[in-house]
Amino acid sequence: MRFACCSLCLVGLVLTSTSCDSPTPPDPATTASSASVVPYNASASDGSLIQIGIAIAPVPLNLDGKNRALVGLGSYLVNAVADCAGCHSFPQYAPGGDPHLGEPVVVNQATYLSGGAPFFGPFIPRNLTPDAQGRPARLTLEEFLVVMNKGADLKGREPFVPSPDNDLLQAMPWPAFSKMPDREKRAIYEYLRAIPCIGSAARCGSSGSR
């Protein structure tokens, strides 16, 4: 199995849409991976992307203890640019909501980013929803950045490519993600912290999916 995400055009779109002009005061956020604070300076151009991201999030967001600006930007990247649900949700659309069939878009909230089908042979897109500790894909922020930057598969699951000692993700376009500025990667992580957990009671807590 693999932590995978579908995006062919992500880097160019992100880098051209997030300038550093007219920064506003930082809006700190506490990450789930540690008690450290993630500073974030929202630029003038980021503002519209943040609002779009909040508006298009297809599931309820838990913003308690989260950086709203990061969540909004992360939602924009995940839902309007990278189409992470295209690989990580199966089925992606609810019955009657598939735009490829000419239907009005209705995202399947019950499967949103909870893991995909075997589109890539033995490499199955992972469950990206947060666990009971608020860790997307059960990864700390530091681990998430390693995955995004180096493509390391930290789950220890077969098949190991190219080797058990150097297990790299084969379906996720991490070479492209690695070129993104850190703030975009942190924004994706913060957004994934805010979406509902989908999975077993062991993953999500005593109540299971939430």
Image (tube, rainbow, N blue to C red):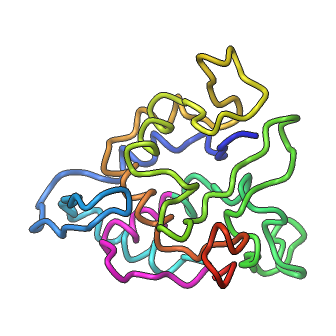
| x then y, percent, for residue 117 | 85, 52
Task: Identify which residue is drawn at 52% across, 44% down.
Answer: 10
Does 21 sit above or below residue 151? below
Q: Residue at x 75, y 62 (%)?
A: 89
Q: How many marks?
A: 0
In magenta stretch: residue 60: yes
12 over 192 or under it: above or below = above
Q: Residue placed at 27% from the left, 62% from the top? A: 45
Pinpoint residue 141: horizontal percent, then vertical percent. Answer: 39, 50
In front here: 109 or 166?
166
Q: Residue at x 64, y 81 (%)?
A: 206
Pick the front one: 92 or 100: 92
Image coordinates of residue 3 in percent, x first then y, are 65, 43
List x then y, in percent, for residue 202.
Answer: 67, 69
- Indicate whether residue 69 is drawn in magenta: yes
Q: Quadrant of residue 163?
A: top right
Q: Nearer the viewer, residue 42 or 27?
A: 27
**Image quadrant containing the N terminus:** top right
As displayed, is residue 158 above or below residue 57?
Answer: above
| Quadrant occupied by the C terminus | bottom right
What segment carries the magenta color?
Answer: 59-77
Q: Is residue 157 left or right of residue 62?
A: right
